[in-house]
């Protein structure tokens, strides 16, 4: 996992710089993922252990839209940052040490979730036998990152490819990237729909964007893109992304009025799938650029609580599941708006998992894994 507090600037290797804003982005992403999972119980898109039936269609639609936006960029940015840390991490180690490090930091937490926390989350809601309740579920991404990291290490070990010097991306390159990811999405979703989970609970329909951003993370590190990212370019594409948000509900309402189903958005050779495949990178690329630029220019600092949150961000990902479910069940008898419920669960989960993580990181050896 990307624990790094210090990142060496690729262009000026002799000068160590502390990139506080990348740590702050890690905290922001952890909060967003908690919010996304909290939303799912009340109508936000995606599957969850506990689902609360509601007739509040407006709030449900808002949660669905919020999760669609979070889904569009959060994991892509996660893989980008993880890859950005990978070259420096590999450079300090041999292949075997890098592989061992990734196994302990990614596979072991993934297995713990699969064997312990996932069955716990399921059985908090309904009784289910142990073996059928095994799964990586919402911690699928650590296994995906493990495979991405191993693939990167194998390339470094057996096919020593030097990352070419590539100048700062221009707008034309950004638009080409959006179209490229969109085409890959559409083709992949013909065979792997986004509402289906496969081995390791992977949703392969979303993987083209994850793989592309992992590769871009490595390239960005070697070419010092983050330091030289043009804030005007980032602002321009963020504006385009924000404007594109209105497209989704418009197309959604038109499609729903015709078929009454979202099925065509999930994949296959359909207009809806093509639209969603293109809309997702159009939204995500601009948001990611905006976050990277905005945090670098405005939030490149730290205070003690932010440093601790950044250090705890990985363990927050891991332990959030049962905390969210417990809080959702505890609030089910309370008759308040589901937007308020989702917000309460999000804030309480984030605070609780942060407190628990601080205790976990005091345990010898676990602090090396997490």
Image (tube, helix red, strand yellow):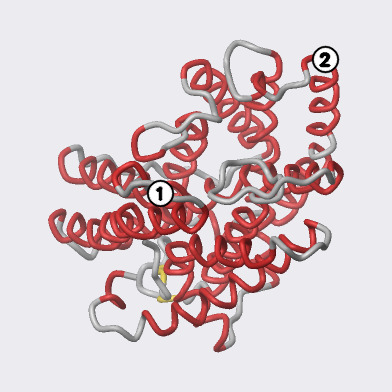
Q: Which mark is residue 218?
A: 1
Q: Farthest residue in the bottom direction? A: 304
Where is 350 relative to 98, above or below? below
Residue shown at 72% from the left, 63% from the top: 333
Which quadrant does the N terminus fall into?
bottom left
Is 74 left or right of 18, judged from the image as shown? right
Where is 66 relative to 113, above or below? above
**Which tag, 2 or 1, sits closer to the chain's start?**
1
Q: Which mark is residue 342?
A: none
Crowding at label 2, few (<14), some or many (≥20) Cα neighbours within 10 Å? few
Is 81 left or right of 174, judged from the image as shown? left
Q: Nearest the camera: 88 or 227?
A: 88
Report whether residue 222 is seen.
Answer: no
Label 1: which secondary element:
helix
Residue 53 spot, x, y in % from top left: 72, 45
Q: Farthest residue in the top direction? A: 269
Q: Residue beneath label 2, please?
A: 258
Is 95 left or right of 108, judged from the image as shown? left
Distance from label 2 to label 1 (Cα)? 44 Å
Residue 106 spot, x, y in % from top left: 31, 57
Report whether residue 368 is seen.
Answer: yes
Crowding at label 1, few (<14), some or many (≥20) Cα neighbours within 10 Å? many
């Amino acid at each position: 996992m990307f624990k790094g507090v210090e990142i060496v600037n690729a262009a000026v290797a002799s000068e160590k710089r502390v990139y506080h804003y990348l740590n702050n982005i890690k905290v922001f992403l952890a909060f967003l993922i908690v919010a996304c999972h909290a939303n799912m119980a009340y109508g936000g898109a995606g599957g969850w252990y506990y689902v609360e039936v509601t007739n509040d269609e407006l709030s449900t639609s808002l949660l669905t839209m919020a999760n669609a936006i979070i889904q569009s960029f959060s994991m892509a940015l996660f893989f980008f940052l993880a890859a950005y840390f990978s070259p420096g991490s590999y450079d300090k180690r041999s292949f075997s040490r890098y592989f061992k490090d990734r196994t302990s930091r990614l596979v072991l937490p993934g297995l713990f979730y699969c064997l312990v926390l996932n069955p716990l989350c399921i059985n908090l809601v309904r009784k289910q036998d142990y073996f059928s309740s095994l799964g990586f579920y919402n911690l699928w991404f650590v296994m995906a990152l493990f495979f991405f990291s191993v693939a990167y290490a194998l390339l470094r070990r057996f096919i020593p490819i030097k990352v070419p010097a590539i100048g700062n991306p221009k707008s034309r390159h950004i638009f080409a990237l959006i179209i490229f990811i969109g085409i890959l999405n559409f083709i992949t979703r013909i065979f792997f729909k986004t509402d289906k989970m496969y081995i390791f609970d992977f949703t392969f329909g979303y993987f083209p964007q994850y793989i592309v951003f992992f590769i871009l993370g490595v390239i960005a590190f070697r070419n010092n893109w983050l330091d030289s990212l043009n804030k005007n370019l980032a602002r321009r594409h963020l504006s385009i992304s924000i404007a594109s948000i209105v497209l989704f509900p418009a197309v959604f309402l038109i499609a729903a009025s015709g078929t009454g189903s979202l099925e065509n958005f999930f994949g296959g050779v359909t207009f809806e799938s093509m639209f969603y495949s293109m809309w997702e990178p159009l939204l995500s690329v601009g948001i990611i650029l905006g976050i990277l630029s905005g945090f670098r220019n405005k939030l490149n600092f730290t205070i003690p609580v932010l440093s601790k949150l950044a250090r705890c961000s990985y363990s927050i990902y891991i332990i959030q599941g049962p905390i969210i479910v417990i809080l959702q069940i505890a609030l089910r008898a309370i008759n308040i708006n589901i937007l308020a419920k989702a917000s309460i669960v999000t804030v309480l989960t984030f605070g609780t998992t942060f407190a628990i993580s601080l205790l976990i990181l005091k345990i010898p050896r676990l602090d090396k894994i997490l």
